[in-house]
Amino acid sequence: MPFRKFLPLCAAFLCSLFITIGCAQAPNPGNTANSNVNNNADPIVIGYSNWAGWWPWAIAEEEGLFAANGANVKLKWFDGYLESMNAFAAGQLDGNCQTLNDTISFASDAVNGEVVVLVNDNSAGNDKIIVTSDINSVEDLAGKKVAVEEGVVDDFLLTLALEEKGLKRSDVQIVPLETGAAAAAFAAGQADAVGAFPPFWLTALEREGSKELISSAAFPGAIPDLLVVSQKLIDTQPDQVQALVNTWFDILDFMQQNPQRADEIMAKRAGVTTAQLQQLKEGTRMFTLEDNLEAFQVGNDMKSMPFAAKRMTKFMVDVGFIPESPDLSKLFNDSFVKTYAQSQ
């Protein structure tokens, strides 16, 4: 995902930037976390990587929306999505942007706990399996080399697609590479297929005759993209978690009211042109407040994250992604989304 190349800014620079913009831009009166940022406190560190649903966080940094909501935040960019998850699980981050299945995969190993507090988006076609011209069906992948970032989101998509056609992941030759490297390897003719999210599938499609075989659009609800924070952060700084969630909805408002400026910021963060950005946004369904409230509810289909989590967990255990099911009872916390909703 879900994209998943600027160096993180130092905390001092961020704080001064937030003060400057915060003075020039009044906070959204609808927010419940409009307290002043404590510039003497260490910022909370949130990881994110190259995915269309997470690029909007750069808007908050550029436009002072963190400060407007009282959030003392340092964004840390990761070129490799897996690297961000490893850092979060090891306690090096206070939160991270990651998918539901990947959150489940790392839940047992996270030293400070991992809790979903917000849905940024659902992948609705932006995760893709790109193949060579001679591959015309999922069944044709049998015995072929598939480059993919092993154990993460597009590996999951690949496995879902294979299972649907009665195949196993072991029926293909996995070429384990970080997603950007996987797309480059495919474009260079070193693999027959690749699983990738944007902007990396643009690289894959540069190979002559390459094409999309299947995408996340075929599996609605299978790839929700989330803001996940540590249980330690919730216990020690719940006000900062609330400020983060409030900021996200201000970002969505900014995107709606200032589409050109928002696209410029996101394109810069993603390392693509604004024209390419439009193509990459098409397969990403951004989640509104109402979508979030629905997603956290217990249900009987993939629109319900608790339902999806159980199904994904069983699937990942069955295929050997994880040895056993982690405790899912504390995986979701909708209180911050609900508090925001009550403030509107």
Image (cartoon, rainbow, N blue to C red):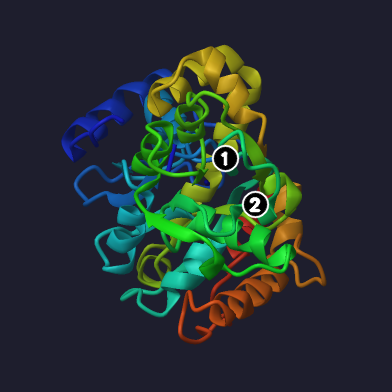
Label tally: 2
Element assignment for label 2: helix
Residue at image point 48% right, 51% down: 146
**Amino acid on which disc 2 is placed:** Asp
Residue at image point 62% right, 75% down: 315
Residue at image point 68% right, 56% down: 139
Q: Is residue 308 above or below residue 248?
A: below
Q: Are marks 2 and 1 in contact (CB under 8 Å)?
A: yes
In this orientation, which residue lies closer to the viewer: 165 or 8? 165
Single out the mark in the foreground, 2 or 1: 2
Point out the tag, 2 or 1, that comes first from the N-terminus.
1
Element assignment for label 1: strand
Percent x, y of residue 182: 39, 43
What residue does disc 1 label? 131
Q: Quadrant of residue 95?
A: bottom left
**Amino acid on which disc 1 is placed:** Val
Question: Is residue 18 in sight in this rendering?
Answer: yes
Question: Is residue 261 in sight in this rendering?
Answer: no
Q: CA distance from mark 2 to mark 1?
A: 10 Å
What residue does disc 2 label? 140
In this orientation, which residue lies closer to the viewer: 13 or 58? 58
Mark 2 neighbour density, 10 Å: few (under 14) some (14–19) many (20 or more): few
